[in-house]
Image (spheres, grey):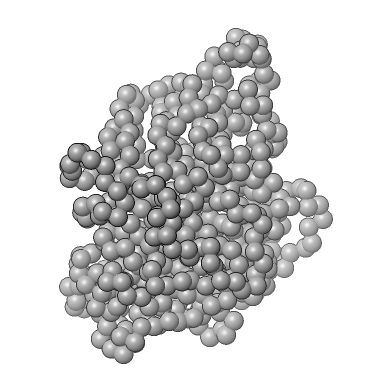
Amino acid sequence: MMMHNGNNGYGNGVMASASTTTSTAMTSSPSATNAQSPALKTYFKTPEGRYKLHYEKTHPSGLLPYSHGKSISQITLAHVKEKPAQGGAAPSSSAITSSGVRYAAARLLGVGAGNGGRPPSFVGGNGASKSANVTSRSSSLAGSNGSHSTLLSNYDGKGTYLIFNVGDTLFFSDLNSPDKDPIKSIHFSNSNPICHAFDPEAKDGHDLLIGLYSGDVYSMSLRQQLQDVGKKLVGAQHYNKEGSVSNSRCTSVAWVPKGDGAFVVAHADGNLYVYEKGKDGTVDSSFPVIKDQTQFSVVHAKSSKCNPISRWHICQSSINSIAFSADGAYLATVGRDGYLRVFDYSKEQLICGGKSYYGALLCIAWSFDGKYILTGGEDDLVTVWSMEDRKVVAWGEGHNSWVSGVAFDSYWSSPTSDGSEENVMYRFGSVGQDTQLLLWDLSMDEIIVPLRRCPPGGSPTFSTGSQSSHWDGACPVGTLQPAPSMRDVPKLSPLIAHRVHPEPLSGLIFTEESILTACREGHVKIWMRPGNLESQSNSSAVLVGSGPKELPLLPGKTSAASYKSVHR
């Protein structure tokens, strides 16, 4: 068997208070960091070939985002589909037909900061409310020429976009462009954006969620934000305004798959709220005091007009991350108390869960078939949980610090796989505060040996000769398991370990063409899969900064990054 680790955990100790502080640590000079660290290679090898650094995304070097309390950069990929055909005249500008022309328009407006200029921020509150946490920072060029706004109002917005937060600002970059700097930014004047999520199947246009340090939540149309230049945040719906429902910071947000506009918001006080975006939220929900903080409980709003519609009390401490299974049947949470909890979402019932080997769990991810869950956290391990057996079935050892992000690679298939259930192999990745990306291969055959091939009526015997009750049948439904002994769980070793950033890592996403890695300072790297870039000379290793060949990246299916919160 193999050995080693996770999803989005950053060694973020106790969080700073909400009093405003400048984000000195988060905005330290990357060049200074690079000068003190060994040169980073622009490729890493796997059995299927080389992954090569294609290009990077970051916030403008001249911009030092202000931080209202501690926050860590997270990444979300958003694929905006072609705008549905509407009656009337078609858009007159041909600038919407290609990524290159879109970028020409953005550069004309001073939005794409590829020339080193500082891009404007676009946004204000969500309408009339003076308490809105968003303000507008428009460039003089964009604000002085009405024709520019007209150009982007016709802009279709189709494409794949990278969304990431740094300090008090949310940035949007075109994933298909070689430009490093974002095409748009939204500045929040009173709080930091902490977490975000995108719904590619949204029906009414509101497809982007943003959760703030203050506890406020916004839903909006990404297309509308991209079309609007130098104006306020367009058409955003504001939830939990001024802490009307909870004054605890948001830690994670997620759309309910096939939920017809429903979404969930997790908070640092251990509560999770379910909202429906179709409701205007003018009637605030009020929920009774939680009688027993140690027990899971669900309470529904008294009125059908209220938003949120329900409160789930998960645990006494912070919920660090949440994730739905692909079919939306199960909701999994991980928290500061070190527990994974898996719920039947429609039945609002705890199914299973268990304790980390040590410390808090920080990140989580589902396999595409819903059979396995990955978690990572302060024990430096990547833990593999089985939904069938409702227990830990493997530990990945390989990280030297907290695991901050985990994700399954749903686009990878083993060259030796025959498609049968007996020969399934999973590829997944993890990133950590040790600045490393680790890739892992998980073979079903390795996992089922101790579970289903032990002598009838007995426990499996390991190389040490000891027997363990850990494998005696599936755990009962509704129970949380203690951490198993280290000797009882098979160990995995990483396929590769590669130092990808000079700073601690915070996020990981797999696409059909690439792997995206992000550090907590707001720098993102795109690593192209073998065969997706033209062959290059292998005569010597190329160092970061020498500029890999820039080729267009095709839009691909996206998967969510797991770590979406500030921990502790």
Q: Residue at x 54, y 67 (%)?
A: 23
317 or 314: nearer the eye? 317
User: Can residue 270 be spotted in the picture?
Assistant: yes
Image location of residue 123, percent across then percent down? 44, 79
- Furthest-front residue in view? 36
Quadrant in the picture for residue 183: bottom left
Quadrant in the picture for residue 194: bottom right
Q: Residue at x 55, y 42 (%)?
A: 401
63 or 268: nearer the eye? 63
121 or 469: nearer the eye? 121
User: Can residue 156 be spotted in the picture?
Assistant: no
Image location of residue 359, percent across then percent down? 66, 43
- Furthest-bottom residue in view? 144
Image location of residue 91, percent across then percent down? 22, 76
Q: Residue at x 29, y 48 (%)?
A: 543
Relative height, residue 182 to residue 4 (above, below): below
Image location of residue 358, percent across then percent down? 66, 38
The C terminus: image quadrant: bottom right
| Drawn side of residue 326 relative to residue 547, left or right | right
Quadrant in the picture for residue 283: bottom right
Relative height, residue 546 to residue 167 (above, below): above
How many numbered marks, from 0 up? Answer: 0
Q: Residue at x 70, y 33 (%)?
A: 482
